[in-house]
Image (spheres, rainbow, N blue to C red):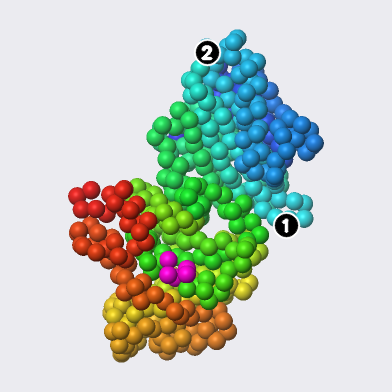
């Protein structure tokens, strides 16, 4: 629990800034571009700033900024942030290490910011980071964050940014005992409703036990962000840069483990609608209601990386939230790939009790702006098992539904309950729900829902239901292996 938990709003930031100013072992530089010097002003206001601030600057003009730090591809970017931290930290150490390096923890704080313009169009965001020594004379460590600023006007965004910056400096110097403690400290006195932390990267000797994949999963589970992104190597990435001006083709799954079905879903969708050069194809995994450990979730991120696909980890179960998330980052086409079992989620009113319009409102949100859902077929024996599920039968499929065991049922010929049949037909006839055909018989024969348990029980032949790279990764990491 934070030592500042019971402070009044606004007092927490001031107390942290004063505590840092009174700690004569920490001394550094503040370089801020884009919104004014919103962080360092808290240290000046707190009093005793001469004990903390070696230099404060704002190279606001682009030509001046380029002359100091070099020319980046984008000014509000990780590249620019790292240029700022590297330049300022290097100068500080070169100038002062001989005189006070034996008793001083040097640091360089930097941020580069784009607040919401005066016309209200666009979303405020910032790259923020700190290079620092955990102990005098130690090798430097880095913290790099990406923030989304949700206040509607630039003034309040600047205010929130300043508080998060103070929190970052304080956490880097004093709150490194765990990932949870560190990331929760970032929004103290601000709140997740004003600032979203959708990326965090830790490196250096100050963070020996911090795993960056786990850190991003914790951001989702702690409610600091709705989603985090991993690229095709499983490396954390920032959605705003990754999806910029791209179309999106995304398939949802649990990946326990990633199976031939998952890969065939994407393959069939790409054959039906060949993606253009500006299309990002990825998987999405919802962990909001999962009881799995972070270690298992991180391992599943590794399984997706083994097949070279990006992965979006989210906390919202409702399908309709995904297009809204992508619309924050791109104006390109959004296409979702679903399994037949996902129709149950789509039409289940229990998922939409928070929406006044229930299922109809959810569908309106899901399918606006030309969003399509492509539905992967299911073999008859598996559809029978799905129909036997009480929720699936109540919500979607009639209990009298008869289907041959070896049939391949698509969204073009599946039977649904009368209470959802009209909506289902409307969506299908108007191209919102698109049946997928041509599925691989080998993939259709897989049983992905029981695969993890069969691996745990030592069943022979499970390797035939997953891509070779996934089988190798499961064995390498001993994931779901009996006795591990």
Q: Position of residue 429 (x, y in %)?
A: 55, 86
How many residues crowd mark 2 within 10 Å: few (<14), some (14–19), many (20+)? some
Viewer-side residue, 228 vs 18: 228
Local SS, label 2? loop
Q: CA distance from mark 2 to mark 1?
A: 48 Å
Does the magenta stretch mainly form a helix, a strand or a loop? helix
Give the residues in magenta.
263-267
Viewer-side residue, 263 vs 209: 263
Mark yes or no: residue 354 visible.
Answer: no
Relative to residue 319, is residue 245 depicted above or below? above
In reply to whether residue 264 is colored magenta, the answer given is yes
Q: Residue furthest top?
A: 99
Q: How many marks?
A: 2
> Is residue 353 left or right of 89 when viewed as pictured?
left
Residue drawn at (41%, 66%) of the image: 262
> Is residue 2 left or right of 279 when viewed as pictured?
left
Q: Which mark is residue 103?
A: 2
Q: Which mark is residue 121?
A: 1
Q: Position of residue 275 (x, y in %)?
A: 58, 68
* For discs 2 and 1, the disc positioned in front in the rendered view: 2
Residue drawn at (59%, 45%) of the image: 147
Q: Position of residue 115 (x, y in %)?
A: 70, 47
């Amino acid at each position: 629990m934070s030592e500042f938990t019971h402070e009044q709003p606004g007092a927490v930031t001031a107390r942290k800034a004063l505590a840092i100013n009174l700690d004569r072992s920490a001394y550094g530089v503040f370089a801020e571009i884009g919104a004014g010097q919103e962080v360092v002003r808290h240290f000046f206001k707190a009093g005793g700033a001469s004990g903390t601030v070696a230099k404060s600057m704002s190279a606001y003009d682009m030509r001046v900024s380029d002359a100091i730090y070099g020319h980046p591809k984008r000014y509000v970017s990780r590249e620019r942030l790292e240029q700022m931290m590297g330049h300022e930290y290097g100068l500080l150490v070169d100038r002062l290490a001989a005189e006070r390096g034996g008793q001083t923890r040097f640091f360089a704080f930097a941020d580069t910011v784009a607040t919401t313009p005066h016309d209200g169009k666009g979303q405020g965001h910032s790259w923020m980071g700190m290079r620092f020594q955990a102990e005098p004379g130690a090798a430097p460590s880095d913290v790099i964050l990406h923030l989304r600023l949700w206040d509607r006007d630039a003034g309040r965004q600047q205010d929130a940014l300043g508080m998060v910056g103070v929190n970052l400096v304080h956490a880097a110097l004093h709150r490194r005992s765990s990932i949870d403690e560190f990331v929760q400290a970032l929004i103290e006195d601000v709140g997740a409703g004003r600032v979203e932390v959708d990326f965090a990267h830790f490196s250096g000797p100050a963070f020996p036990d911090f795993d960056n994949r786990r850190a991003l999963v914790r951001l989702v589970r702690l409610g600091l962000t709705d989603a985090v992104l991993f690229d095709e190597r499983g490396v954390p990435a920032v959605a705003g840069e990754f999806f910029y001006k791209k179309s999106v083709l995304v398939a949802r799954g649990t990946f326990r483990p990633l199976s031939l079905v998952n890969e065939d879903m994407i393959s069939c969708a790409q054959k039906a609608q060949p993606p253009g050069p500006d299309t990002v194809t990825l998987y999405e995994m919802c962990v909001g209601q999962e009881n799995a450990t972070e270690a298992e979730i991180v391992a599943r991120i590794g399984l997706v990386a083994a097949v070279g696909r990006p992965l979006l980890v989210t906390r919202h179960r409702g399908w309709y939230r995904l297009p809204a998330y992508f619309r924050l980052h791109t104006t390109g086409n959004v296409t979702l790939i679903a399994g037949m079992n996902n129709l149950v989620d789509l039409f289940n009113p229990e998922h939409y009790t928070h929406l006044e319009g229930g299922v109809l409102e959810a569908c309106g949100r899901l399918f606006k702006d030309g969003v399509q859902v492509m539905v992967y077929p299911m073999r008859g024996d598996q559809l029978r098992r799905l129909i036997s599920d009480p929720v699936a039968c109540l919500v979607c499929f009639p209990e009298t539904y008869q289907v041959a065991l070896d049939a391949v049922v698509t969204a073009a010929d599946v039977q649904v309950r009368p209470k959802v049949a009209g909506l289902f037909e409307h969506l299908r006839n108007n191209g919102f729900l698109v049946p997928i055909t041509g599925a691989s018989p080998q993939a259709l024969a897989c049983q992905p829902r029981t695969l993890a348990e069969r691996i745990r029980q030592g069943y022979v032949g499970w390797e035939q239901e997953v891509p070779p790279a996934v089988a190798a990764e499961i064995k390498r990491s001993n994931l779901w292996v009996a006795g591990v």
